[in-house]
Image: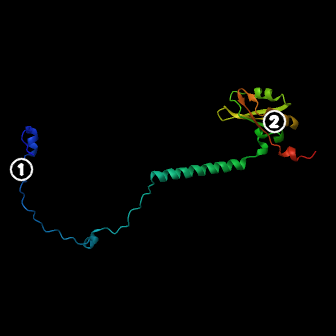
Amino acid sequence: MSAQGLPAHILALFTPRPPPQHLPPCVLKPGVSISGCAEYVEFFSSDPPPVREPWESPLERKARRHREKVQAHKSAQKKFIDSYDPHKDPNASGDPFKTLFVGRISYDTTEKKLKREFEVFGSIKKVRMVYDQKGKPRGYAFIEFDHERDLKNSYKQGDGKKIDGNSSFLLFSSFRSSNRSP
């Protein structure tokens, strides 16, 4: 195939390149003799090395802080457990076998509304809704009845009752009532 009839810029691609530049041959220089460092040992000081400063990596620092936080929490928890007396707790007063747990309560429900809803089943001694530290309701409450029969009646008939749009969940402990002698 001939290159005739091709444009000049394409013909320029097929032109031979100039010969490479001539360089003189490399001459190897004699290398430096390398010996050990034993002859220089006397120039070093014989003092003991400086004390190494402790350094912790970010991961070690994170682990140390976590250990300190867990240890502080455990000591505070132990101190609290040692000082806790459930018999002197004002929130844990009353008969647990006359107390009904009501869960899944709407956050808008008040103690008065709960008392009004459950007074249908019998006389109520005390209603206590549980609030968090900021004063917002947690969604459950404890209702203490005067008589155990009222508790059982409310448990049987009131489970799933809608209060402010939410269906409630009722629970009570029947351990003592089933094992009690007449």
In the image, 145: left or right of 22? right
- State whether residue 34 appears in this view: yes
Q: Between residues 148 and 11, which one lies in front from this camera angle?
A: 11
Q: Which mark is residue 155?
A: 2
Residue 159 placement (x, y as % from top left): 78, 34
In the image, 77: left or right of 156? left
Q: Are marks 1 and 2 in contact (CB under 8 Å)?
A: no
- Quadrant showing the C terminus: top right
Q: Marks 1 and 2, how far apart in space?
A: 105 Å
User: Which of the two labelled residues, at mark 1 and mark 2, occupies the earlier sequence position?
Assistant: 1
Residue type indicated by callout 2: Tyr
Residue 7 placement (x, y as % from top left): 9, 37
In the image, 77: left or right of 95? left
- State whether residue 130 appears in this view: no
Residue type indicated by callout 1: Pro
At x 87%, y 38%, the residue is: 148
Classify mark 1: helix, strand or loop. loop
Residue holding disc 1: 18
Q: How is the image coloured?
A: rainbow
State the image quarter where residue 3 is shown: top left
Q: Is residue 165 above or below residue 152?
A: above
Q: Nearer the viewer, mark 1 or mark 2?
A: 1
- Sort mark 2 into few (<14), some (14-19) or many (20+) by Cα contacts within 10 Å: many
Q: Is residue 46 above or below residue 21?
A: below
At x 13%, y 68%, the residue is: 30
Classify mark 2: helix, strand or loop. helix
Residue 100 placement (x, y as % from top left): 79, 37
Q: Which mark is residue 35?
A: none
